Image (spheres, rainbow, N blue to C red):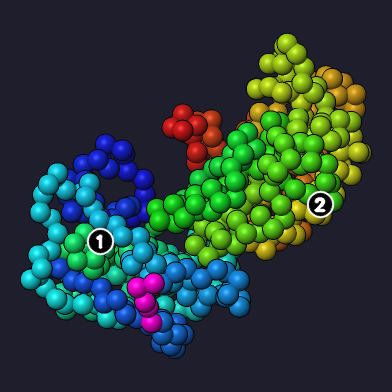
Amino acid sequence: MFAPFSLAFAFLLYASIVSALWPLPSFYEHGVSVVWVAPDVAFSYAIANQTAFYSPASSNATSSPLSTLNTASSYAIVQAAIQRTQAQLFNDKFVPWKFHPRNSNFEPASNASSIYIRNVTVQQNQSDSAAILKPRAGEVNEQYTLFITTSGVVQITAISSIGILRALDTFTQLFYQHSTYGGVYTPYAPVSIIDAPKFGHRGFNMDVARTYYPPSFILHTIDVLAWNKFNRLHLHSTDSQSWPLDIPALPDLSRKGAYRTGLSYSRSDLAQIQEYGMYRGVEVYIEIDTPGHTASIAHAYPELIAAYNIQPNWDDYANEPPSGGLKLNSSAVYTFLHTLWEDLLPRVASYSAYFHTGGDEVNKNSYKLDETVRSNASSVLQPLMQKFVDYNHGYVRAAGMTPVVWEEMLLEWNITLGSDVVVQAWLSDESVADTVAKGHKVIAGNYNYW
């Protein structure tokens, strides 16, 4: 199944030939026969028994840029995945030295089987739903089967194009390059794999605000997530330390709020990151953390932030420095949010079904220094927070996305959330149970395990 395993168990896998696959499939049987991949191996792809295309390969195969694909569709997703598979098989030149004892003779002999895989049959049993490119959790069936015979017959079957992607990632893990002869082979034939995910949401949270990562690094991270069959990348895009996200309608946000000029993500950067993930079955969704964790806004719009960078007792007003959060009863803040959402949400909605509005670690003391509130009393703050959350979620829904919040909005602030809202629990396992008991879907990510 697509599920994490302990590091200790991972090390044990190196002592066994099943170390070829990660994560381990739900069902996996294999033999010990050698089968080679022909340099001109072809992939045939059909949807519901209607042939989509027949793709010949070459030893110089490379992944085509997305711009060469006319539309984002099932065909384009699978075509791009097949091109990546060809490139990995013939260009990555992976020799599994570390899977075997030092100086052991683990590779096929020159007179070993000369059976070649000349065609890989890829069958998608159903047409994809309209949600395939930006699905909500559970909307896409990712199950697949993969069979390789000792005579070189390969059959991949899945319900969806995303299932085909998962199967092709597994397929490439079964093959190695021979260090002497240069050919690509598997020593595991026959292979029988039936696989499906245990969890509909398998995500990774990447903080690009406290630490800036260049777009190329994020793209590589998406590659790694896809290889490990993750299906979500949560970009924590802004925080008190920096605002690295370009908002053309509010250009000073990143111009003044990023760590320095050049350490921000342009509109095209963000679109590339999300599209790159889409073609790999990794949905990239964005978080703008509000109303706390927003001190970086003060570099451009100081009038919007309460309790900004209080020193030396910053910890009276925030969980970490610099302190500062959006004022809670300010018409100027709502004007700012309107401009922000009108710029950002339509862009990211093309690639994701979710948008995260934050809501963690909001320090009530900061509102004693907010001239629009002047109180830290829950009876005063809770109605204002309810209005704030409702306003933001209204924009998220209008853009066709599902809101996501941190657990504090539900469990600490007692905000009445829409039934569609997904709650991300991070403080304890008990938070997960409490959130489910209140009727919400929950993303479990206990920080004690980070």
Q: Amino acid at mark 2?
A: Pro
- The residue under the point 32% across, 80% down is 40
Mark number for residue 176? 1
Mark number for residue 248? 2
Question: In this view of the protein, which residue sits in the foreground, 266 or 279?
Answer: 266
Q: Secondary structure at mark 2?
A: loop
Question: In this view of the protein, which residue sits in the foreground, 431 or 189?
Answer: 189
Q: Nearer the viewer, mark 1 or mark 2?
A: 1
- 59 left or right of 407 in image: left
Q: CA distance from mark 1 to mark 2?
A: 47 Å
- 252 left or right of 130 in image: right
Q: Give the mark nearer the N terminus: 1 vs 2.
A: 1
Q: Position of residue 381 (x, y in %)?
A: 80, 28
Q: Which residues are magenta?
A: 56-60
Picture quadrant of residue 369: top right
- 150 left or right of 199 in image: left
Q: Is residue 6 above or below residue 36?
A: above
- The residue under the point 65% across, 22% down is 319
